[in-house]
Amino acid sequence: MRSRLKLAVPLLALALAATGCTSSDNSDPEPVGSTGGNAAVGSYPRAETLYTTGTQYGPPSNWNPLMNWTYATGTVGLVYETLFLYDPQADKYQPWLAESGEWKDKTTYELKLRSGITWTDGKPFTADDVVYTVQLCKLPSSTYSTLCTWLKSAEAVDKSTVKFTFSKANYQEWANWVYNNPILPAHLWKSRSENETTSGANDKPVGTGPYKYLTHSQDRQVWVKNDGWWGAEQLDVAPKPKYIVDIVNGSNNVALGLVLQGSVDLSNNFLPGVSKLLGKDSGYGLETYYDKPPYMLSANTAWLVTNNTKKPMDDPAFRRALAHAVDTQQIAKVVYGDMVAPADPTGLLPIWDKYVDKNVTRELGFSYDPAKARSILADAGYKNTDGNGMVANKDGSKIKLTLMVPNGWTDWMEAAKMIAQSAKAAGIDITTATPDYNSLVDSRNSGKFDLVINNDQQMSNTPWTYYNYVFRQPIAEQQTAGNFGRYSNAKAWKLVNELDATEVTDLEGMKGITSKLQRIQLTDMPIIPLWYNGLWSQYNNSVWTNWPSASGSNHYLPTTWRGYWQLDSILMLDQLKPAAAKK
Amino acid sequence: MRRYFTRKFLIYLLTFFFAVSIDWAIPRFMPGDPVQSMLSRAALHPESATAMYDYYSNSFGLDVPIWRQYLNFWGSLLQGDLGTSVWLYPQPVSSVIANAIPYTLALMLPAILLSWWAGNSFGAFAARRKWLDNTALPFAYILNSMPYMWLGILLAWLLGSVLDIFPLSGGYGYGLQPEWSLEFIGSLLKHWFLPFASLFLVGFGGWAIGMRNLIIYELESDYSHYLTALGAPQRLIRRYAFRNAMLPQVTGLALQIGVIVAGALVTEIVFSYPGLGNLILQAINNEDYFLLQGAFLFIIIGVLIANFVIDMVYVLVDPRTRTGMRGATS
């Protein structure tokens, strides 16, 4: 502290002189401070405002809930709502816009809607809205156009009942659909063209949710509480912040600075080294979900994707050896400062732990063991022929693999280096390359790569999404979503489809299938699970407290990421408490 | 005179054509596919992805042969249509740029002009004055040679994080709405100050060093010695030297103003200041052909106009150009 001051004094003088000539406002960096009371139109009282960052990478440019990769933070969740919520930690569906939903027979699903819900323009929310939204699957440019291949019809029986008839009931996928997709106001959207519907900016969003659009500018999006929100009365849920200001991501140093300062309450950025700033004695007032490693909840699995159509990755024995050659413990520790946990051999996220068949993983699992890797390679016929310590192909040709990660993704770049290093120690020659993201996507999708790291599958209500990613068939010229390693196994794919057609309540049935899939996965090693990427989330408790944590009463997911508000994050807002006013 | 400007004008027209063609081509040489990258960020079913890929390729006009795309590009450009941003879909490029440009101009214009004026005055004053040369100039060298990124982060850390005088990021307080109030304008200025100051400092150092060296060069030239021999006062000699030394500095200034719309990329990133520089970086990262094209188009136009202005200003400030033109026409 002392040395800091010493340095600061001369600069302080300089800076004061400088401020003197620029502006004469109060030198409080927080806009309104604790003045509260007079909520002038132009500013948001600090004590009633939640500042977030970590989702939005550019100026808010659209509020179209159908464009799930780019809509302004909170468009779905705060404004547009889904029929259900899903709590991944408790594995529970919570009726939201819906009152209940049940399968009347094998292929008929009946949905009861809550009554008394209105859109922010005053019109009531009805079954027509749901029917309209579901039927958007008929548009080829819709993100869920495949739904129409197995949904036969959706009809409004009365104002609050919708009947869905399926030609093929994919129970898992449907359970995923009902909590993932926002319901749109038919009375406003019906007249829109396909263009406007699926890719319009929708700059005056009218939803049913707890917040309304207030304003936006180049570097922020502001939402204001919707006072007439139905949930307050029907669910006794009351989001505490009056305003939510989401700030467009800056560079890491800016994001870290803002959350340390308390200008931002919730940062969902990946901030390297933040684990060192936690704890009471650090004095920053920073918190994360766990107060010990891995600090963060796990959001998705990072895999080492092997190109299974290329030599020698087409050989399961080689892939198995490679899996034994990666020291994920070390990566978690050195690269992430223990903010991630090494993955289970199955790669299933902690929320899916109950699906892991421990018998299978005991028998076929793997862990870092270079000696084992070497012996697997030797047994399979990969020999070190030229004495440089690196094994060669069975036909004697050299093995030289390239592991690609996107340039600028510093954690992955470091991790890739460590993978290459530990693989070399086991006799597999891997070098790293860091092309830019777009060119990596291009090579990855077209199968022109040796090894890449990928984590495109987020947590969900069902391991089906996970296995759909791993085993997806058929292999297309461009693999756009999942199975980038081009692993082909018709039997596994059949099991994935069987899993999809298993009812979500049939836990034993699901386990039976996932166990078989795990056996295939761990025998063939189509993809190598590395670690669980965190649900990056750090909070400053100077204005809001009672943040989600493993030890407290608030267990909801602490994030603003797209697709997560409906995974219960919205309820986090209900749990927040204003910090005791401080001087 | 007229022939001089007609010729210049034709050259500019030709340059514009080639520069814009290159501007169109360069993003398309980048490896990768913007639509593919965009959709890789969406949560999609693989089959939906194929349909959406076709849809977006079509809506961006990327599904026609490349020569056709080029012709279409000129066609819409001449109608003033810069296309739709891929990254900030569905915002039109022109409005994306229009929203960012006020910040960039407000930051760059004062920084460039003030640092030019202050740097040149100071450089001219400091030249050949021993005590200033020995004390202030090393400081200017340090400013000028310090990696800008580092200077920026240092300023942000000291004045932002440690002393908490200036905010770390943003265009104005995150708790404010734009309005004509003292509070808002104060906040705007406060957020503007650090990025401005960092640009000013670096520019100041550069101009001061340049001016000082030029003045020394002029003071060593024959006409100065001749004037000294005639017994002219030092003030007068320095004034002549200053006028001559200004010429290259005027060119430098015009060129800087020409690329002004490119924004100060690093500044905007270090201070998370909204503006064009930030957008250009993101446009490259997201392979946003149209936004890149649009941003570069403004830079091209800026550079050309700046050059044109220099040509004219030179006629005014440098008598030798006028003589040359008269020589050419007679």
Image: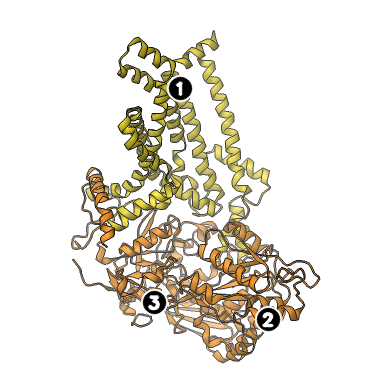
Chain colours: A orange, B yellow
Q: Which residue ends up furthest to the right in the rendered image?
A: A395
Q: Amino acid at mark 1?
A: Met
Is residue B231 visible to the viewer in this orientation of the structure? yes
Task: Determine the secondary structure under disc 1.
Answer: helix
Q: Please give the name of the residue rendered at 47% of the width and 64% of the height, measured from the top-left corner.
A: A65
Confirm whether circles 1 and 3 share one chain.
Answer: no
Q: Position of residue A363 (x, y in %)?
A: 64, 89
Q: Is residue A33 above or below residue B275?
A: below
Q: Amino acid at mark 2?
A: Ala
Q: Are marks 2 and 3 in contact (CB under 8 Å)?
A: no
**Would you identify the image quadrant in which residue B8 lies?**
top right
Which chain letter matches label 1?
Answer: B
Separation (CA) of disc 2 from disc 3:
36 Å
Separation (CA) of disc 1 from disc 3:
65 Å
Q: Quadrant of the C terminus of chain B?
A: top right
* Residue that carries the numbered disc 3 in the rendered image: A289
Front-most of A507 and A165? A507
The numbered mark, 2 or 3, whose residue comes first in the sequence reads 3
Please identify, in this view, whether the residue under mark 2 or under mark 3 is nearer the observer: 3
Specify whether A179 is left or right of A45. Answer: right
Q: Is residue A560 above or below residue B89?
A: below
* Residue that carries the numbered disc 1 in the rendered image: B312
Q: Are marks 1 and 3 in contact (CB under 8 Å)?
A: no
Q: Please give the name of the residue rendered at 58% of the width and 83% of the height, measured from the top-left corner.
A: A107
Front-most of A152 and B15? B15
* Residue that carries the numbered disc 2 in the rendered image: A492
